[in-house]
Amino acid sequence: MSTVQHSVQFELTHAGSARGRLKLRATHTWAGTAPGFGPVELACPAEEDLLQETLTAWVSGHGIPPMSFTGYEFRDLPRLATMTLTADGWTGTLRRRHLAVTARGRALRIEVAGRSYRYQVLGGKLRHELRREGAVVTMSRSGWRYPRTISGTGQGGVDGLDIGLAILLEGVYTRNLSFSGALYSWPGRFLSRLDDIPDF
């Protein structure tokens, strides 16, 4: 897997949506090029049965290992509940502190491929940071729902796994990574899963 030292900038553009077939959701796609890693594409949700409770976002690319994130559906995105993350054949371990107040405290902690990541919101809801020892990828989006562009800057010894994972998480409902976002979205998430403990 190639590694880029110093800094790399990239941008993905919304390529539109493919209307789902009968009883299937539409899939939204963002595509672009990450210098040093080639073309990359984010799709979410992957085309899924409208009656299915879980949705999947996935990333693929020339220099980006295949990866996916699956979680309970909320507003046509997988959310941070009953999560499954796969990356380059690895299955990740994910955890977060539901009752924390600060963005750092509420960050999503990811263990995958022998690495430890922290993914957190950076003020508001349009900027996020994925960080591990020796590398950080900062992401921003032009809007919350189906943004026109998704942009990123990688610094340090970033590689395809770092870039791909940061892009993948832009296809996940992460409003509750901030305390204010959790309060805003909690009623809807609670009503959507009355038979489970809500993912505050």
Image: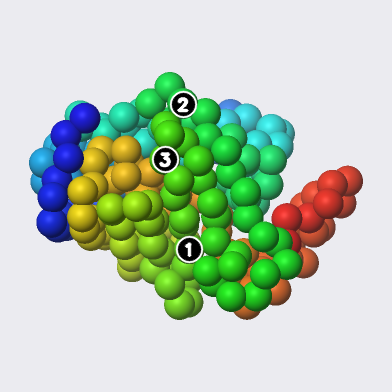
Q: Is residue 126 above or below residue 19?
A: below
The secondary structure type at the circle numbered 1 is strand
Q: Is residue 2 left or right of residue 195?
A: left
Q: Name the spot of residue 174 as percent of width and height, x first.
A: 55, 59
Tag nearer the camera, 3 or 1: 3
Q: Is residue 122 above or below residue 49?
A: below
Looking at this view, name the residue that lies furthest to the right: 195
Can residue 171 be seen here? no
Query: Which sits in the foreground, 75 or 3?
Result: 3
Crowd around label 1: few <14 · some 14–19 · many ≥20 (10 Å):
many
Q: Is residue 117 left or right of residue 10?
A: right
Of the residues shown, which amino acid type is indicated by label 3?
Arg
Q: Is residue 169 left or right of residue 8?
A: right
Picture quarter containing residue 2?
Answer: top left
The secondary structure type at the circle numbered 2 is strand
* Residue that label 1 marks: 120
Choose the circle earlier in sequence order: 2 or 3. 2
Residue at left 13%, top 50%?
Answer: 5
Of the residues shown, which amino acid type is indicated by label 2?
Trp
Q: Quadrant of the C terminus?
A: bottom right
Q: How far apart are labels 3 and 1 at the CA level?
A: 16 Å
* Residue that label 2 marks: 90
Looking at this view, name the residue that lies furthest to the top: 89
* Residue that label 3 marks: 115
